Image (tube, rainbow, N blue to C red):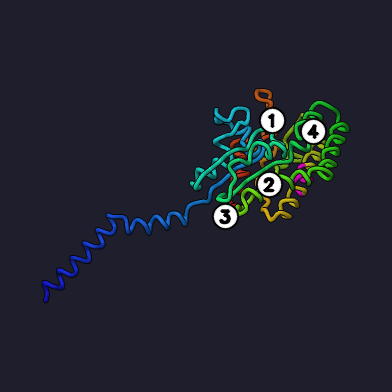
Amino acid sequence: MRLSRFTSYASSLLLAAACTLTGVGAAHADSRDERAAAPAYVALGDSYSSGVGAGSYDSGSGSCKRSTRAYPALWAAQNAPASFSFTACSGARTGDVLANQLGPLNSGTGLVSVSVGGNDAGFADVMTTCVLQSESACVNRVNQAKAYVDSTLPGQLDRVYSAIESKAPSARVVVLGYPRFYKLGGSCLAGLSEGERRAINGAADHLNTATAKRAADHGFTFGDVTSTFTGHEICSGDSWLHSVNWGDIGESYHPTAAGQSGGYLPVFRGAAS
């Protein structure tokens, strides 16, 4: 009887070992891993998503200047999504996203990020005007941009968001906004006037408000980065944004690597979870 019990016990141990070695146990582990895996992720948008200003650009991305230090690449490295497609591109407007960036989206896409609208509203021209011309010219140009945001941009954002919904109906979509550029009453002793800085910050808030409204109307999550950049604006003494960068003018007024990792990534991480 004792021998029979010992034989039965030993057989059970051997069977358990065999199951593990032949993959029966591994199948359960694999299924647990699959449940824990991050969803297929597609990163769309403009230079604030491609990572202009953060350096470490992928040479294969050409003028799109996609950075390994941009928040989409950082999130993908940390979360190992089922797949990662990074199509955000420097200078992209809403029409560019529609024409050139939506290819990777499909019914299996589980997560999408996008920042777009600043170039449509004339971001580069606003900053050029404010840097090179008078305060009144700057404020007038800012007001023109705000009028565009009110009259035209919502329809353009709707087209982008509707296309994302159509191509990736199951995806969680996170729309990222833009930071305020300047700390008012800060440490800058030269450059723009305080009135110009205030007008530019107001334009960023105006754009964010309009974008957040369109995102909400489509059931998307809006990621507001103004709070994470607070204390790290230009003139703060610890800026996460480039001011005028004469060495690479295209990086001017874009987040540094610290801005991507400390300003954008936490907001996206929270919205994506």
Q: Chief secondary structure of the magenta span?
A: helix
Residue in front for this viewpoint, 116 or 53? 116
Mark closer to the observer (1, 3): 3
Q: Amino acid at mark 1?
A: Ser
* Residue beneath disc 3: 273
Give the alpha-carbon distance from disc 3 to disc 4, as whole Å.
Answer: 35 Å
Q: Amino acid at mark 2?
A: Ala
Span of residues in magenta: 204-209
Q: Secondary structure at mark 4?
A: helix
- Does the rendering let one see residue 192? yes
Q: CA distance from mark 4 to mark 2?
A: 29 Å
- Residue at mark 3 to residue at mark 2: CA–CA distance: 23 Å
Give me the residue at 68% from left, 39% from top. 97
Tell which circle, 4 or 1, labels the residue nearer the N-terminal end: 4
- Left/right placement of residue 93 relative to residue 32 reads right
Question: Left of 157 or right of it: where is 172?
Answer: left
Q: Residue at x 64, y 34 (%)?
A: 89
Residue type (three-letter) at the residue carrying disc 3: Ser
Residue on which disc 1 sits = 252
Count how many numbered circles sit on residues in the image. Answer: 4
What amino acid is labelled 4 in the image? Val
Q: Nearer the viewer, residue 48 or 117?
A: 117
Q: Compare marks 3 and 4 and give the one earlier in the sequence.
A: 4
Residue on which the image places disc 4: 126
Q: Write down the quadrant of residue 230 in the picture.
A: top right
